[in-house]
Image (spheres, rainbow, N blue to C red):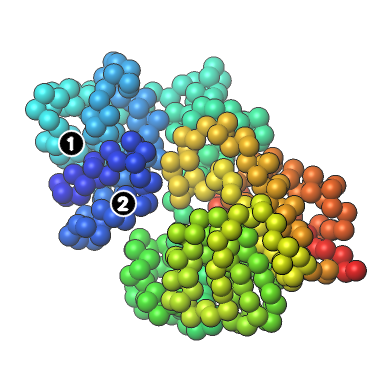
Amino acid sequence: MGEARKIAWTVLNKCMAMEQFSNIALDTAIKRSSLDSAERGLLTALVYGVIEKRLTLDACIETYAQRSIKEIAPDVRNLLRMGLYQMAFLERVPDHAAVNETVSMAQKWVKGFVNAVLRAFAREGKRIPIPDKDEDPIGYLSVNYSFLPSLCEKFVAVFGMQRTEELLAAFGKQPPLTLRVNLLKTTREELLLRLRAQGLAAEPTPMSPVGILVTSKIPVTTLSGFEEGLFFVQDEASQLCTQAVGAEPGMHVLDTCACPGSKSFAMAMDMQNTGSVTACDLHANKLSLVQSGAERLGISNLQICARDAREENSEWHKAFDRVLCDVPCSGFGVFAKKPELRYKDPLQSERLPVIQGDILRNSAGYVKPGGRLVYSTCTILPEENWWNVEQFLQENTEFDLIEQRTLYPDTDGTDGFFFAVLERRAE
């Protein structure tokens, strides 16, 4: 397993230096390696685990190294994080193996330091120095659940202390892989049989009628039916959102912020590959992934278009039966899948509601009388969600609110997600 640890260290150094997102860096590393399935599993666990538990691990480092984390070189920090993570959170890795393997990777002049920190942690019973919940509630949340203090403060201000702790705990649970069945090619029952025949644990999603939960750890591209386009990855919350769009055969549908394309694919399938789905995105280079995904799935009623969703297109005025605005957001609902977001200061997202509101107002002009406008985000913050919808409705009295829903990981078992269905009154 030494090679898996070395690759993990390299990937973490890139991710922590903000050179790459963890999923991209990890996928690239796995493709370039010749690791077997067990080694790939350890590599994945180390990369995602260390990123997810970074602040918890850093508190341990500062306690047992007796120095500030900033005084330790970045690559040595990551090495210590890896060693401590294995000792604290990976039950199948013996402490002596975690210590020896970690020390063996350290450069000569820091071997003694790395060894001393890890052995001190073991000697103290692997005690994690978590601040007292009553004396320092934000510090407690930050270290215990590994979220930036300012993000903990934001959540407490919105949800209160008890609910925040429930949410942070839920965001720390590894979600199952969620698939959306391609009904153009198969049924949910048939795909379930194929996946189970592959030896996988697969169950129907409890709320979506077209989803499957796969709890077995396996790369999605190796699942039975992937090459044939029998499914694509889509969280159950997102499936419920596209279901609420109500796209029907023969309709003309606009997805204003389409990448990576899962909602466009779902709507095209709901339309039985008839009518048209126009999938737009600001970044033209990302739209090629939408196009290739549609081809794998056998979708032919989808066309791509590079454009800024805030800029008006007069040719589209009242031209679409359904318009989906899955707007750019803080992502403060998908921490389990994007662990880097745990360390994003909420201040970085302060201007997003303005951008989101601009997209929603502009997109409203494309909805036919009697048509639907759906607004969605993958965050649970009210200023990006129902506050935007409320303001829109005050300004656009020809629209009525049909449905509004926020999904949470602790109560719904999905990503944190929001969608609102608005209907334009018939003229």
Crowd band around label 1 with a 10 angstrom C-alpha radius: few (<14), some (14–19), many (20+): many
Q: Residue furthest left?
A: 108
For the C terminus, the image quarter is: bottom right
Q: Which residue is drawn at the image coordinates 66% and 52% (left, top)?
A: 310
Mark 1 or 2: the one toward you: 2
Of 22 and 348, the residue lying toward us: 348
**Type of residue at label 1?**
Thr
Of the numbered discs in the image, which one, if any, rests on residue 102? 1
Q: Residue furthest front?
A: 314
Find residue 74 and report its image quarter.
Answer: top left
- SS category of the residue bearing label 1: helix
Task: Answer yes or no: is residue 410 visible.
Answer: no
Confirm or deny contact between disc 1 and disc 2 (CB under 8 A). no
Of the numbered discs in the image, which one, if any, rests on residue 222? none
Q: Which residue is drawn at the image coordinates 44% and 65% (left, top)?
A: 289
Q: Which residue corresponds to mark 2?
A: 26
- SS category of the residue bearing label 2: helix
Find residue 364 and report its image quarter.
Answer: bottom right
Percent x, y for residue 376? 65, 54
Crowd band around label 2 with a 10 angstrom C-alpha radius: few (<14), some (14–19), many (20+): many
Instruction: Give the mark count.
Output: 2
Q: Which residue is drawn at the image coordinates 34% and 75% (left, top)?
A: 198
For marks 1 and 2, the one nearer the N-term is 2
Whether 245 is drawn above or below 139: the answer is below
Task: Answer yes or no: is residue 426 visible.
Answer: yes
Of 66 and 417, the residue lying toward us: 417
Whether 168 is drawn above or below 228: the answer is above
Percent x, y for residue 159? 66, 35
Percent x, y for residue 130? 43, 25
Q: CA distance from mark 1 to mark 2?
A: 20 Å
Of 151 and 329, the residue lying toward us: 329
Q: Indicate left or right for 418 with 341 as reference.
A: right
